[in-house]
Amino acid sequence: MTDKEMPHVQTTELLRTSQSWDGAELPDYPQGRPELVCRKYIFPAGERLPLHHHPVMNLGILAEGELTIVCTDGRRKTIHAGEAIVEMVGTVHYGENSGAKDAVLYMFYLSQQGTPLSVQQAEEN
């Protein structure tokens, strides 16, 4: 449906890309039947996830708060409420909420049945 076919509905394209936030090209779609997963995450203020990577493509919209994604090589991306982000595939990183209030994130994963959405990594010393 086009915007002209929905004259009373407001639409805003938040994101259209073939790259993750760090500029890396997303991988080709996997073969086989897809499994779409949508998750809501609530990150309390001061919370930090463990190191992990995603073997599947995903994108999210931060509904509330502020969230920073940090790569092991030092690259960082902070997103704010209302912003969309495409996470990296295969790149080790963590997310942290260094803000004063909870961050609410909705993530959408393009996966296949039996494939993990994320894989935890050993912390580096």
Image (tube, rainbow, N blue to C red):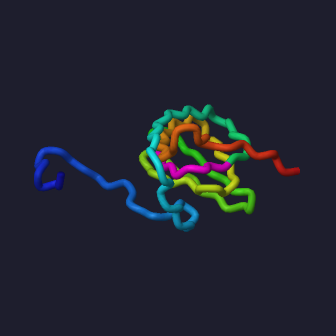
* Image spot of residue 90 (x, y percent): 64, 56
Q: Nearer the viewer, residue 39 or 44?
A: 39
Q: Main secondary structure of the magenta part?
A: strand
Give the magenta range: 53-60
Q: Residue furthest right?
A: 125
Report the side of 88 relative to 63 (left or right). Answer: right
Q: Quadrant of residue 47?
A: top right
Residue 59 falls inside the magenta stretch: yes
1 vs 102: above or below: below
Q: Quadrant of residue 77?
A: bottom right
Q: Residue furthest front?
A: 32
67 vs 38: above or below: below
Residue 62 falls inside the magenta stretch: no
* Image spot of residue 13 (x, y percent): 32, 55
Please tell me which residue is depicted at 68% across the width and 44% down the height of the picture.
Answer: 119
Q: Nearer the viewer, residue 45 or 58?
A: 58
* Image spot of residue 59 (x, y percent): 48, 49
Q: Nearer the viewer, residue 86 or 119?
A: 119
Please tell me which residue is depicted at 50% across the width and 64% down the height of the picture.
Answer: 19
15 vs 114: above or below: below
Please tell me which residue is depicted at 88% across the width and 50% down the height of the picture.
Answer: 125
Please tell me which residue is depicted at 50% across the width and 35% down the height of the picture.
Answer: 39
